[in-house]
Image (spheres, helix red, strand yellow):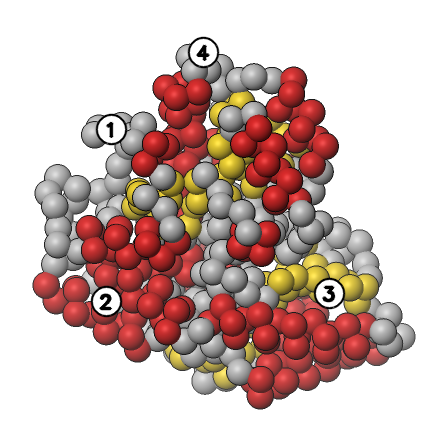
Amino acid sequence: MSITEITSSQQAIDLEKKHGAYNYEPLPVVLKKAKGVFMWDVEGKKYYDFLSAYSAVNQGHCHPAILQAMYKQAENLTLTSRAFYNDVLGQYEEYVTKYFGYDKLLPMNSGAEAVETALKICRKWGYEVKGIPNGEAQIVVVKNNFHGRTISIITFSSSEEARHNFGPYTPGFIEIPYNDVEALEKVLEENKNIAGFLVEPIQGEAGVFVPEDGYLKKTKALCEKHNVLFIADEIQTGFGRTGKKLASDHEEIRPDIITLGKALSGGFYPVSAVLADKEIMDVIQPGEHGSTFGGNPVACAVGIAALKVLKDENLAENAEKMGAFFRKEMEDYIKESKVVKLVRGKGLLNAIVINDSSESSTAWDICMTMKENGLLAKPTHGNIIRFAPPLIINEEQMKACIEIIIKSLKAYEDRMG
């Protein structure tokens, strides 16, 4: 059977609609090639990438060092399963744990798998170390979170769209407001069966919502006081995206468990991981958790190379600098704008809030205009647009992108009168 040759964007879209599940609604652009901060569609039009595959491509598209590491490993050994040792996994575990300052790593593939793994570790620690009665462990989560799409994770999602008709749901979770220290303190004082607190240092899918200064430090202190594990989901906020190695570093806290993914792959291959110290990680014993592909040689080689690029090219520092520049330029524009209410973020994880309701199509319409003007971004809600370019972006490129964004916003403002 022959494979259909794609000759136009519409043909590719039609092919997906005919043969694929309708579980995404992408911007109508069909990409064929990417390099650095740029992507090209089937017809050859060039775009700035301002989404970075939801921060999975922090190092830029098709980075040659990561490509070479993947190619070199794929020539020798791609998969053994964990039925046998391989000669790369130990090197990878050593490199990543030393890079982030933890004792142990459990390798997985997707971000959702990393979160599920962290939840399992946390519950088991609650029973075997903290002494919570069997079957009664609780994990505290926050409203408007996003941690993935599995049954357990959507159980504590605030999105009815994510939950609708997928029940019954997994018990054992308590939801409190985000950015509310007092709410966490209250629930920890009232319930002695809490094993962990799961939180995003910055809520990406919620619209790049940055908590108040001190929130992470205060909640970490509360977890320590009540012998509760602080679990930081750094899948989107890690790897230099916010201007630090981890977003948790902005408040100089050390989570008990960290989930990692996305940019650990450099955009090449699904790679995720959970980090913790020995006394936490060692509750997992052989046969209790695993993955056929987790810790495979290609993933390990890619992960090491991806982290080396972040370090060697000072990408966290560049994200801090370029992010500050972006927010300053956007804030100057907002002073005269009737369309944009505010810009927020850290490093190169930013969002603008449009002066419209969250049920509107405004953000989508503006993203369509930006697409026509050569920049790709995606709404997180009806009135919020997230901006997350690859961390390799330079000042000249950032200036060009800001011009496109403002031009697109002004065009929308002109249409609105």
Q: Residues within 10 Å of mark 4 (few under 14, many from 20)?
A: few
Residue type at mark 2 is Met
Tell me the SS state at disc 4. Answer: loop
Q: Is residue 14 left or right of residue 220?
A: left
Q: CA distance from mark 1 to mark 3?
A: 46 Å
Q: Is residue 154 left or right of residue 214?
A: left
**Does the rendering let one see residue 73?**
yes
Residues under numbered marks 4 and 2 in contact, where contact means CB atoms less than 8 Å apart:
no
Q: Residues within 10 Å of mark 3 (few under 14, many from 20)?
A: many
The residue tagged 2 is 70
The residue tagged 1 is 285
Residue type at mark 1 is Gln
Q: Is residue 386 left or right of residue 71?
A: right
Extreme bottom residue here? 396
Residue 133 is tagged as: 4
- State which quarter of the image contains the C terminus: bottom right
Residue type at mark 3 is Val
Tell me the SS state at disc 1. Answer: loop
Sequence-wise first label, 2 or 3: 2
Q: Residues within 10 Å of mark 2 (few under 14, many from 20)?
A: many
- State which quarter of the image contains the N terminus: bottom left
Sequence-wise first label, 2 or 1: 2
Measuring from the top left, give residue 186's x and y in whole percent: 69, 25
